[in-house]
Amino acid sequence: MLFRVVFLVILALVLNHVAKTIYLLGFFKVVYKQHPGFCRTVPGVEKGSEDVTVASNGLAFISSELNGKKETVDPSRMPPNIRGKIFLFDFNHPENDVIELPLKGDFDRDSFYPHGISLYEDDKTDEKRLFVVNHRARGDECIEIFRFEEKIKSLIHLKTIRGDNIYSVNDVVAVGPDSFYYTNDGYFVMSEFFKRVELFADVAWTNVGFYDGNTDKIVQSGLQYANGINVSPEGRYLYVSSVIRGFIYVFEIRNDNSIEEKQRINVYSGVDNIEIDKKTGDLWLGCNAVLYQFVQHVGNVTIPAPSLVLKVRLGSKSAPYDNVDIQQVFMDDGSLLKGSSVASYYDNKMLVGTVLDKLGFCEIKHL
């Protein structure tokens, strides 16, 4: 009798996990075309626009040509003719193409595979620093810090940050000229098989780290596939996406730079990167509309994967937020953009980045 009870309990838990996984992978989602205005692709970006961040003056920085996932972290397995790039797009002149930013200074250009990016703007000096996750090679994850020279449209390499806790980095958010928070999106670094098992087993083994300019440390563990990360305009709250679970962690930043969870905002979609409208505090989310199709797309880029952008308006000034409003801004079946990863907003215009595909631009005529 006891054996039967134990068996039924285990069976129920397994079936519950399978049912949750099927739901989260999006097997029953309906995809349709919804554009907020005229949308097009931006010439010059063909092999991914994984992360996009925009400066206060409307200049947008785009990380490109990583080829997306950690399968390509080993340089020997990189597809031919793939070379990591940072592009620049001007929201003030959206009719212009992107330009590739030269990377200058004492920097190994051939070991540059950019992923998540973040821009720090110094209000006093007007200096702009770009923080870039760089997957140099397996076991050699790091954060590169560049200074943006606007007059010559170049990135000057300042320093490379490594640390024992910087080992499977997905995204970064700068909170000072030399300090940042970052996400590690996996526990198994060297084994792709176990990374996939970890991903779909829905285990909470990922974390958030902090680098204070000298040392790095883990400030929050036990997260479920921590992915995108960003900070509120006033610097009080930290937002972290859980791509598999489909929600946003909301953390309050303490005076000692530790963080405390305050809320989880469920958006019922595979959230990748988070961008912030610094004027309103709204969260702009690039999402995998149907996760199982996105997984297929990563394995074969010719297979389309739907794209989705959500805007989250927070109903109060402090967390936990009341009356959170989640609005669908953009959806595409893959005919325009395959596999969206980020959405960056500026002055009624939007860039939509993808992991392996092109870069999209939309005029926002209605929300």
Image: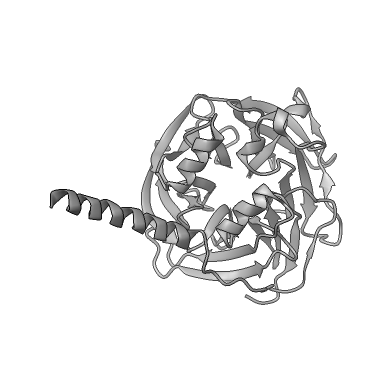
Where residue 345 appears, as percent x and y from the top left, is: 66, 61
Work out whether 64 lies above or below 293: above
48 lies above or below 314? above
Q: Nearer the viewer, residue 336 or 124?
A: 336
Percent of width and height locating residue 133: 63, 36
Residue plotted at (78% across, 26% down): 105
- Residue 63 drawn above or below residue 305: above
Q: Is residue 63 visible?
A: yes
- Left or right: 124 as drawn, with respect to 358: left
Front-lying residue, 199 or 102: 199
Residue found at x 63% / y 37%: 71
Q: Position of residue 180 (x, y in %)?
A: 54, 37
Furthest toward the left, the residue is 1
Note whether residue 132 is visible: no
Given the current orientation, which residue lies at the most extreme top position? 106
- The one nearer the camera, 219 or 256, is 219
Colouring scheme, one of rainbow, by chain, secondary structure, one colour:
one colour
Q: Is residue 80 above or below residue 362?
A: above
Q: What residue is drawn where x is 75% and y is 52%?
A: 59
Q: Nearer the viewer, residue 86 or 206?
A: 206
How far across and down, in percent of the image, does residue 288 sit? Answer: 59, 58
Image quadrant where residue 263 sits: bottom left
- Numbered-mark total: 0
Query: Which image quarter is the C terminus in?
Result: bottom right
Q: Position of 57 compared to 182: left or right?
A: right
- Identity of the residue drawn at 57% across and 65% down: 310
